[in-house]
């Protein structure tokens, strides 16, 4: 007998399966390669690190941004040691199987879809058929001494918007990894469709050469994922990126998945199979969370429409916001007043052309 079947062995799937097992629910997890290491280098804000499971390791750094000038952020940044996080999210009572969620025979009382954001469109809605906006990045993993001209030990570059060459605006993301090496990545925050990885590679190499960094034959890191909510699978409870937990204007979801897994598991436990889906939806999508999501999508609308020569101004305005408003927009998915205040302050302080872009393209959020 299976109380809960979880599809997916990413951070959301493991967090949900272990939260269910901790409540005594008989839990099974299915994924094509359930023991495969996570390929991504994951980061979150240092103040979110307490959400990590016991025994999880991470490295922290002071983080700075560069838009109209250099600015140190008040929040530290944490980069995860994936294996220790995976171990911490592995509960011995969870039965693990290799396979695909859709091939699992019927029989589980509750099915949770944590299969990530990639889903063929189901063709039933405009949202599903339109190609999603994507975040893409190309990076290299180099020794700390090699990266030193760009980022010093104990530091992270959250965003450097100085452009290496003409073309679409991209930024450098440079973070120290727990293995002592440094990820130097050229990132396209949001583009529809995502900016090509070969273009990002060229931009990264141009930037590195200009800074005197020689990556040699360093291992590479490729990133491409959709920013918009995927079409839901019928009859299952979505969680993680599959549930639209990815912040549409930043691409982050990990901390929210870790934060919400125990609450969703408890709601399912209390509600029982008949009411599980509704109970989970109530936890995930309170009226405030829905409203914040719409505003974040308005932010994505602005990002997609932002001319390259306005990007530095836009991010200079964002990082000039009081830290509590930056935090509200970036990480507080139910802090409606904070997100409204952040966006209204940006709008009030923007130049007329930027304000026009923000006003015109946030209309997109209504669809
Ligand atoms: C390279 C990269 C770097 C990122 N960096 C960050 C970051 O630093 N911080 C952050 O917050 N977010 C980051 N994100 C965004 C987002 O948080 C991640 O995509 C995160 O992995 C989403 O977690 P998830 O568990 O929901 O889905 P995923 O990690 O995508 O896991 C999905 C799981 O489902 C399995 N699966 C797929 N199809 C099926 C199926 N049919 N049946 C069963 N199982 C299936 C997959 O094998 C996988 O195990 C990054 C994304 C990428 C791609």
Image (cartoon, grey):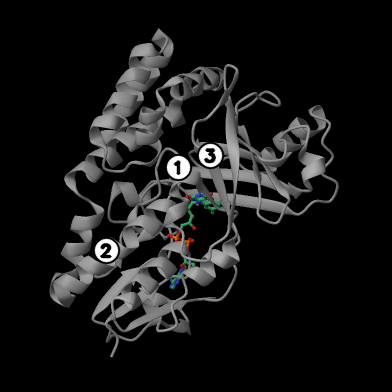
- Number of other residues with Cα within 10 Å of mark 2, as a class: few under 14, some 14 to 19, many 20 or more: many
> Looking at the image, which is closer to me, 163 or 123?
163
- Mark 3: secondary structure: loop
Work out whether 88 lies above or below 336.
Answer: below
Q: Residue 262 shows which numbered tag?
A: none
Work out whether 315 lies above or below 298.
Answer: above
> Looking at the image, which is closer to me, 300 or 257?
257
> Quick check: can you spot residue 358?
yes
What residue does disc 2 label?
264
Q: Residue at x 37, y 19 (%)?
A: 346
- Mark 1: secondary structure: loop
Work out whether 45 lies above or below 324.
Answer: below
| Chain-order first, disc 1 or disc 3 | 3
What residue does disc 3 label?
76
Question: Separation of disc 2 and disc 3 at Cα?
Answer: 28 Å
Cβ of mark 3 under 8 A from ligand 1: no
> Looking at the image, which is closer to me, 16 or 293?
16
Asked if residue 19 lies left or right of residue 188, the reply is left
What residue does disc 1 label?
133
Q: Which residue reaches farthest top? A: 352
Asked if residue 194 lies left or right of residue 180, the reply is left
Q: Residue at x 37, y 83 (%)?
A: 104
| Chain-order first, disc 2 or disc 3 | 3
> Looking at the image, which is closer to me, 226 or 71?
71
Residue 84, given in percent of the width and then of the height, sits at 57, 66
Mark 1 vs mark 3: give the one in front.
Answer: 3
- Number of other residues with Cα within 10 Å of mark 1, as a class: few under 14, some 14 to 19, many 20 or more: many
Question: Separation of disc 1 and disc 3 at Cα?
Answer: 28 Å
Question: Separation of disc 2 and disc 1 at Cα?
Answer: 28 Å
Q: Residue at x 54, y 76 (%)?
A: 33
């Amino acid at each position: 007998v299976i109380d809960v079947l979880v599809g997916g062995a990413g951070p959301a799937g493991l967090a949900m399966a272990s939260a269910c097992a901790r409540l005594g629910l008989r839990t099974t997890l299915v994924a094509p390669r359930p023991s495969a290491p996570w390929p991504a280098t994951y980061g979150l804000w240092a103040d979110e690190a307490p959400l990590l499971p016991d025994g999880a390791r991470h490295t922290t750094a002071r983080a700075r941004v560069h838009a109209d000038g250099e600015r140190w952020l008040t929040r530290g940044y944490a980069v995860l040691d994936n294996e220790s996080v995976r171990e911490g999210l592995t509960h011995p009572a969870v039965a693990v199987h290799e396979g695909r969620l859709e091939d699992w025979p019927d029989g589980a009382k509750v099915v949770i879809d944590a299969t990530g954001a990639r889903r063929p469109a189901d063709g039933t809605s405009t949202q599903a058929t339109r190609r999603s906006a994507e975040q893409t990045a190309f990076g290299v993993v180099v020794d700390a001494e090699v990266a030193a001209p760009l980022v010093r030990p104990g530091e992270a570059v959250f965003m450097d918007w100085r452009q290496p060459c003409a073309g679409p605006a991209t930024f450098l993301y440079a973070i120290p990894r727990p293995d002592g090496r440094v990820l130097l990545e050229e990132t396209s925050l949001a583009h529809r469709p995502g900016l090509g990885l070969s273009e990002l590679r060229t931009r990264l190499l141009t930037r590195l050469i200009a800074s005197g960094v020689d990556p040699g034959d360093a291992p590479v890191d490729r990133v491409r994922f959709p920013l918009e909510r995927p079409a839901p699978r019928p009859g299952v409870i979505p969680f993680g990126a599959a549930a639209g937990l990815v912040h549409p204007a930043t691409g982050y979801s990990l901390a929210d998945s870790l934060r919400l897994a125990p609450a969703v598991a408890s709601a399912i436990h209390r509600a029982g199979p008949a009411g599980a889906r509704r109970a989970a939806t109530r936890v995930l999508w309170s009226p405030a969370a829905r409203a914040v999501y719409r505003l974040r999508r308005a932010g994505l609308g602005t990002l997609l429409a932002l001319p390259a020569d306005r990007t530095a101004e836009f991010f200079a305005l964002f990082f000039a916001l009081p830290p509590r408003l930056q935090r509200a927009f970036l990480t507080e998915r139910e802090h409606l007043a904070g997100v409204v205040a952040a966006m209204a302050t940006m709008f009030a302080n923007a130049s007329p052309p930027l304000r026009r872009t923000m006003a015109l393209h946030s209309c997109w959020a209504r669809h």
